[in-house]
Amino acid sequence: MKKMLIAGNWKMNKTVGESVKLVRQILSGLEKHDLQTGVVVCPPFTSLDELSRVLKDNKKVIMGAQNCHYESKGAFTGEISIPMIKQFGCEYIIIGHSERRTFFNETDDIINQKAKAILQSDLSPIICIGETLEERKNEKTYQVLEHQVKTCLRDIQSLFAERIVIAYEPVWAIGTGISATHAQIQDAHEFIKRQLVKIFAKSGNSVPVLYGGSVNDDNARSILELKDVNGALIGGASLKADVFLSIIYTAQALI
Ligand code: PEP
């Protein structure tokens, strides 16, 4: 059976009230569905507390956060620690998103520290990797992906592989409306999976590799049915319940 995970990255969108409304709509759309697809919503930190109550006792939608600090506490003004996130029942934390790499100087070494801290806290990192347009044009895509995978996963034992998620998100496809071609996605995923097996041996096969970059309800099917795609990390299209639900139904139909 193909593993499928559909994760919504809400970015800096939705007040608490708007978050509750969106999650209620998602829950209601999934009510009558028997789901083997993992569904994760990653709202802003400010909504985690209220949403933990809305999502309590449901078994279909899991909550995640969009970032964390790798230290558990201390003098890091404006940052949020993993224990602070964990208290709201989050199971996933997105790290290394290209917006964090670009606007907040998050490096592969920092992402590695975050990944280790998340795993030590029994949560799952969704580690984002992907090349820029310039790197693709200069035929550096595979070099970049190899370096990102190796560095982000440095010194992580294979026993943790089953809790790791990789999201392949070509930077040029995020929020642009231009998703990568099917061949580009399949080739990149196959390459990433090969790196994961090099690092974790056969446990590497259990790491889901999601695609992210302008996924919507029109292109989801053709992307999700690609052999090495195990789901999607979705930005803009996760902010509308009907669109997000339609992608979840599509993923479920492909399992
Ligand atoms: C993302 O933010 O991870 C993303 C893939 O965004 P979008 O779906 O809007 O391209």
Image (spheres, rainbow, N blue to C red):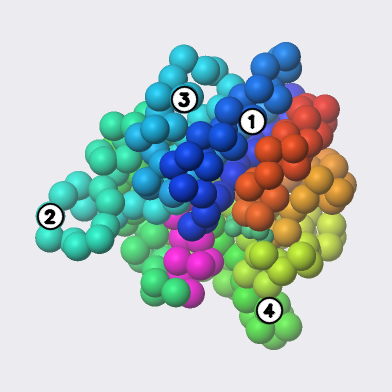
Task: Specify which label sits upstream in the sequence, 2 or 4.
Answer: 2
Q: Name the kind of residue labelled 1 in the image.
A: Ile
Q: Name the kind of residue labelled 4 in the image.
A: Leu
Distance, label 2 to label 4, CA atoms, is 37 Å
- Label 2 or label 1, whichever lies nearer to me, is 1
Q: Nearer the viewer, residue 254 or 250?
A: 250
Distance, label 3 to label 1, CA atoms, is 11 Å
Q: Which residue is mark 2?
A: 74
- Label 2 or label 3, whichever lies nearer to me, is 3
Q: Residues within 10 Å of mark 3 (few under 14, many from 20)?
A: some
Task: Specify which label sits upstream in the sequence, 2 or 3.
Answer: 3
- Label 4 or label 1, whichever lies nearer to me, is 1
Q: Nearer the viewer, residue 242 or 165?
A: 242
Give the percent coordinates (x, y) of residue 55: 48, 24
On the question of residue 169 being in view, the answer is: yes
Does the magenta-highlighted stretch encompass residue 71? no
Give the percent coordinates (x, y) of residue 175: 67, 65
Q: Which residue is mark 1?
A: 26
Q: Is residue 100 left or right of residue 37?
A: left
Residue 96 position (above or below residue 1): below
Residue 133 position (above or below residue 7): below
Q: Which residue is mark 3?
A: 54
Q: Name the kind of residue labelled 3 in the image.
A: Val
**Distance from mark 3 CB to nearest ligand 1 atom below 8 Å:** no
Q: Which mark is residue 133?
A: 4
Residue that appears at 67% across and 17% down:
31
Q: Residues within 10 Å of mark 4 (few under 14, many from 20)?
A: some
Residue 23 picture quarter: top right
Task: Specify which label sits upstream in the sequence, 4 or 3.
Answer: 3
